[in-house]
Each structure stands twice: as structure tokens, then as C-alpha cells.
Image (tube, rainbow, N blue to C red):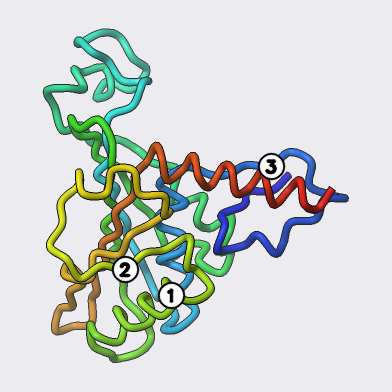
């Protein structure tokens, strides 16, 4: 009945009408808060997202049959391009982005912790500091338990066990001369998502 991403659209939850509830995916929980902050403050014109995602249990230990021929290949030895439903799910929770965002995934041979690369253009002519500043403010206020902001030169394993949906890598925020931006967000695709599932169940139970 409804897809809920905490920090994005939980206020639309209606216990009288919403009985089948999706927590979306770990990737959607990472990218949607980033997108919402940017769109609310600057208005996104177009966006492409790529998630560099740890391999999951639907992939193969050895090459074997699979409906997706790329996912049929050995997970521990390959970087595997594949699809992601995260971009469509973002539109479910932020409808005004319909037709403006798409994306794909790369499955990589790491056990946990993934990263989303969001590339976008916006209506305003601003600099990188303004993008980072709004993300930092959000991480310290209304998205305090959802989004984290870091200025440290960290790598994937540094985020293992992090309970936030997304950790903004401010050192990786960049801009081209023609106004194209890139924002990078890390996420523990296991533990962070498990925490959001717990939080969503808590929200639902509080409304019953």
C-alpha cells in the first residue's frame, strides 16, 4: 500500500489505509534522503545514481545459471554491472522527481558496506560548499539519526556497523564548470538497513 523511507515520507503513513508497507531497499534508504535534501533546497533538474554494492545472497559463488547472465558470474571475483530498483523507489517516495532520475548498480566482491554515487544538475548556480552545508545541516537536525556527515578520508570498512541510512562523504562532493554535481554517500547495507526496519516497525506500532 505504501513505501516508506524514514526521513523522507513517513508523514504520509496512514494506518487506516496503509496495511502492506515496504521499507524500500538499503540503497533507496541511502539515496532518497540525499536526494530530498538537495531537491528541497536547490531543485534537481536531472539525476543519475550508481550504487557500488557489496555482493548479496542471490549471487553465485561459482559461475552458474541465473536469469540475469551477469549475476550468474562468480560474485567473489568480479565487478558485476546490474540493475537497481532504487531510482524507481525514490520516485515512489519523492513523486516530483518522476522522469528526472534513473540509475544502475555494480556488485563488487566485498562482504558489506556499499556506496552511492549521485550525479545531478540543479536549477541554481551554487558551489560545492553550499551543497555540503545543506547536507551537514540536515544531518544535525531533522535527519540526525538518518544521515551522517563526515570530513574524514575514510574507506568502506570504516563504515561497517554504522546505523545511519547514509553517511555523506563531503570530501567527494564535486562540481564541473557547467553545473554538474556529484555527491557520494556510504551505507552499511546490512546493519544500517536493519536499524531502519526496526525504526519503521516502531513507527507503525506507535500508530496502532
Residue tagged 3 = 21
Disc 1 from disc 2: Cα separation:
8 Å
Disc 1 from disc 3: Cα separation:
28 Å
**Of the pair 38 and 159, the residue shown nearer to us:** 159
Q: Give the label, 3 or 2, closer to the camera.
A: 2
- Residue under the point 87% across and 50% down: 16
- Residue under the point 28% across and 35% down: 112
Q: Position of residue 88 (x, y in %)?
A: 49, 50
Q: For label 3, count other residues whose C-alpha is less than 10 Å away and answer few (under 14), some (14-19) or many (20+).
A: some
Q: Position of residue 91 (x, y in %)?
A: 53, 58
Quadrant in the picture for residue 169: bottom left
Q: Is residue 21 left or right of residue 120?
A: right
Of mark 1 and mark 2, the one earlier in the sequence is: 1
Q: Are marks 1 and 3 in contact (CB under 8 Å)?
A: no
Q: Are marks 3 and 2 in contact (CB under 8 Å)?
A: no
**Of the pair 140 and 168, the residue shown nearer to us:** 140
Residue tagged 1 = 140
Q: Position of residue 72 (x, y in %)?
A: 26, 17
Q: Secondary structure at mark 3?
A: strand
- Residue under the point 47% across and 68% down: 144
Quadrant in the picture for residue 102: bottom left
Q: Position of residue 145 (x, y in %)?
A: 48, 61
Tag on residue 149? 2
Q: Give the label, 1 or 3, closer to the camera.
A: 1
Q: Are marks 1 and 2 in contact (CB under 8 Å)?
A: yes
Of mark 1 and mark 3, the one earlier in the sequence is: 3
- Assign the N terminus to one quadrant of the image: top right
Q: Secondary structure at mark 1?
A: helix
- Up-down relation of residue 16 to residue 173 (above or below): above
Q: For label 2, count other residues whose C-alpha is less than 10 Å away and answer few (under 14), some (14-19) or many (20+).
A: many
Q: Is residue 116 left or right of residue 100?
A: left
**Of the pair 4 and 176, the residue shown nearer to us:** 4
Amino acid at each position: 500500500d505504501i513505501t516508506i523511507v524514514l526521513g523522507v515520507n513517513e508523514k504520509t503513513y496512514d494506518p487506516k489505509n496503509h496495511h502492506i508497507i515496504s521499507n524500500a531497499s538499503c540503497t533507496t534508504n541511502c539515496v532518497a534522503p540525499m536526494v530530498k535534501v538537495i531537491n528541497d533546497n536547490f531543485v534537481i533538474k536531472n539525476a543519475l545514481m550508481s550504487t557500488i554494492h557489496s555482493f548479496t545472497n542471490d549471487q553465485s559463488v561459482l559461475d552458474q545459471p541465473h536469469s540475469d547472465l551477469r549475476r550468474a558470474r562468480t560474485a567473489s571475483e568480479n565487478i558485476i554491472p546490474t540493475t537497481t530498483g532504487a531510482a524507481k523507489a525514490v520516485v515512489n517516495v519523492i513523486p516530483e522527481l518522476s522522469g528526472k532520475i534513473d540509475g544502475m548498480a555494480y556488485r563488487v566482491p566485498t562482504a558489506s558496506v556499499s556506496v552511492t554515487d549521485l550525479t545531478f544538475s540543479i536549477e541554481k548556480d551554487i558551489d560545492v560548499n553550499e551543497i555540503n552545508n545543506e547536507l551537514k545541516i540536515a544531518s544535525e537536525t531533522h535527519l540526525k539519526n538518518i544521515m551522517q556527515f563526515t570530513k574524514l578520508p575514510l574507506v568502506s570498512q570504516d563504515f561497517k556497523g554504522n546505523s545511519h541510512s547514509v553517511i555523506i562523504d563531503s570530501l567527494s562532493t564535486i562540481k564541473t564548470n557547467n553545473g554538474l554535481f556529484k555527491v557520494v554517500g556510504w551505507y552499511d547495507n546490512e546493519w544500517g538497513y536493519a536499524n531502519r526496519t526496526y525504526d519503521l516497525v516502531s513507527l507503525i506500532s506507535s500508530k496502532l
